Amino acid sequence: MKTFFSLLFVLLNTIAFGQEFSELETYEPDAEYDNIFVKKVAEDEMQSSFIIWIKKGVKEHYHADHTENIVVLEGEAVMTLGDELFMIKKGDYLNIPKGTPHSVTQVLSEEPLKVLSVQSPNFDGTDRLLVERIKHIPN
């Protein structure tokens, strides 16, 4: 009887608090896409989590009010973060503070770059501001 109540308690807590378990490697895009496909995994008032597939690159942008945390799940790419240029690969983690310009300049792997992106606070898609770099042409 004690075991029954323990299991019931665990089940009710799981339902009440909405925890979720996902095997991220099983996520696949739901449709064909040319360059970028985004799939929302979870959200609440404090965060939004997405799986993002990138075939070519992502234009340089920043988030004025959001911090973004990225874990590379598959693939390799060249990325910028602020003024730094570096390679990312499966298993890498990046913390991108709000206001920091970042981009994926080139996907190097044959398969798309696949990342888990967690934005905090909740991201509604409007806080994505493109960076326009002015190229200096010498006289």
Image (cartoon, grey):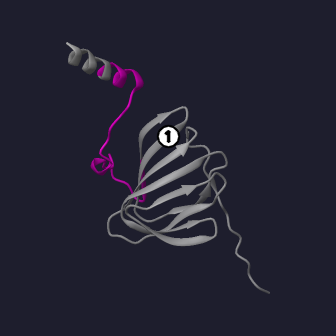
Identify the image quadrant of residue 132: bottom right
Q: Nearer the viewer, residue 66 or 40?
A: 66
Observer-nearest residue: 26 or 97?
Answer: 97
- Farthest residue in the right direction? 139
Nearest the viewer among 39 and 15 is 15
Q: Label 1: how many residues lie within 10 Å, few (<14), some (14-19) or many (20+)?
A: some
The x, y position of residue 114, in whole percent, is 38, 57
Span colored in magenta: 11-38
Residue 41 higher or lower than 45, as above or below: below
Say which residue appears at 54% left-offset and 55% top-offset: 95
Instruction: Where is residue 128? Give x, y as percent.
Output: 60, 50
Q: Disc 1 marks which residue?
A: 48
Residue found at the far front of this picture: 2
Instruction: Report the residue that reaches farthest toward the bottom.
Output: 139
Quarter assignment of residue 134: bottom right
Q: Residue at x 35, y 34 (%)?
A: 20
Task: Give the side of residue 134 with respect to residue 107, left or right.
Answer: right
Q: Amino acid at mark 1?
A: Ser
- Is 15 inside the magenta-drawn segment? yes
In this view, the residue farthest toward the left is: 1
Horizontal relation, residue 58 to residue 84: left or right: left
> Would you place residue 49 above or below residue 94 in this image?
above
**Percent x, y for residue 106?**
47, 70
Q: Secondary structure at mark 1?
A: strand
The structure residue drawn at horizontal position 32% and vertical position 69%, both measured from the top left corner, is 110
